[in-house]
Amino acid sequence: MNSADVLVRCEAAARTYGAGAAAVVAVHGASCEIRTGDRIAITGPSGSGKSTLLHLLAALEEPTTGRVCWPGLAGKPGPNTVGVVFQGPSLIPALDVVENTALPLVLSGQPEPSARRRALDCLALVAAAQLADKLPEELSGGQAQRVAVARVLAAAPRLILADEPTGQLDRATGRHVVDVLLATADSLGAGLVVATHDLRVARRLSRQWSMHDGRLQTDPDAFSSSASATSQGAGP
Ligand code: ADP
Ligand code: MG
């Protein structure tokens, strides 16, 4: 495996919010590597640091100490190399669904008609094509979540970071969205990381990491012993 396969590497990367007595260490010195073809779930309770870790991996946050680097992404992530499905609302209110989905492509210079066609194809993948003309304010939380997934798929990134992408979906729809994330990561030859507190979702990925009080555990045995794991495969 050559080093270009490493999409992102954390070397004792930590993130603290606030200072003094009010300081919160959201992530303690996390060390990990994510490569092309990796399918990784990050589980952990609310407040354990999953979102902060994903933001470090996406360069949306700077580590307070330690280092994050992207050897396989020419040094630094951009909107078309790292795609983030955010946990909270992320659609632009003034743009309709197809415009939101096409936005990363238009911003990277793709002509609008072909960007819209690709956006519609990606919306169809998450069963949201019929929402194309709606504004974000007209969507349910679950519909907005599926559109946010489509927007990431449209950009065809090398690394997909999905933060609780099924959090507002019913079980069948959530299952379908995970199917689509896995299939798209396969067809793009991308890495996929899914933060989730749902162990059913986590078990669909090839590797399970966990977070507790800001500490990242990449040893799958720890997951097996903390969940009633039956389906730990032999690996990807
Ligand atoms: P998770 O995604 O697992 O729920 P988060 O990464 O969102 O965890 O949060 C980890 C910890 O960091 C929590 O204690 C949270 O309150 C805190 N935190 C997260 N973001 C901020 C912020 N912008 N400012 C201050 N504290 C934050
Ligand atoms: Mg979170």
Image: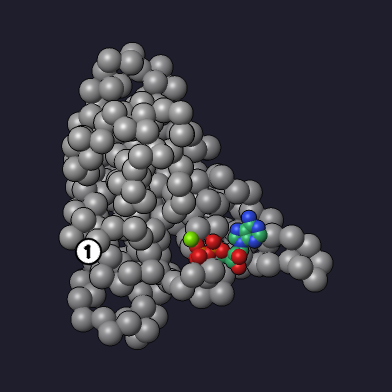
Please provide percent x and percent y for residue 15: 64, 59
User: Residue at horizontal 68%, vertical 61%?
Assistant: 16
Would you say 132 lies left or right of 11 here? Answer: left
Q: Quadrant of the C terminus?
A: bottom left
**Residue closest to the eye, 188 or 178:** 178
Please provide percent x and percent y for residue 213: 56, 74
Q: Is mark 1 within 8 Å of ligand 2?
A: no
Please provide percent x and percent y for residue 40: 34, 60
Would you say 91 lies left or right of 123 here? Answer: right
Q: Is residue 102 visible?
A: yes
**Residue closest to the eye, 114 or 120:** 120
For residue 94, above or below residue 165: above
The secondary structure type at the circle numbered 1 is helix
For residue 170, above or below residue 55: below
For residue 224, above or below residue 193: below
User: Residue at horizontal 35%, vertical 74%?
Assistant: 220
Would you say 221 lies left or right of 8 here? Answer: left
Give the quarter of the image for residue 199: bottom left
Give the quarter of the image for residue 97: top left
User: Residue at horizontal 44%, vertical 53%?
Assistant: 87
Q: Is residue 6 visible?
A: no
Q: Which residue is mark 1?
A: 171
**Residue closest to the eye, 232 or 71:** 232
Q: Residues within 10 Å of mark 1 (few under 14, many from 20)?
A: few
Would you say 78 lies left or right of 209 here? Answer: right
**Residue closest to the eye, 209 or 167:** 167
Please provide percent x and percent y for residue 49: 53, 65
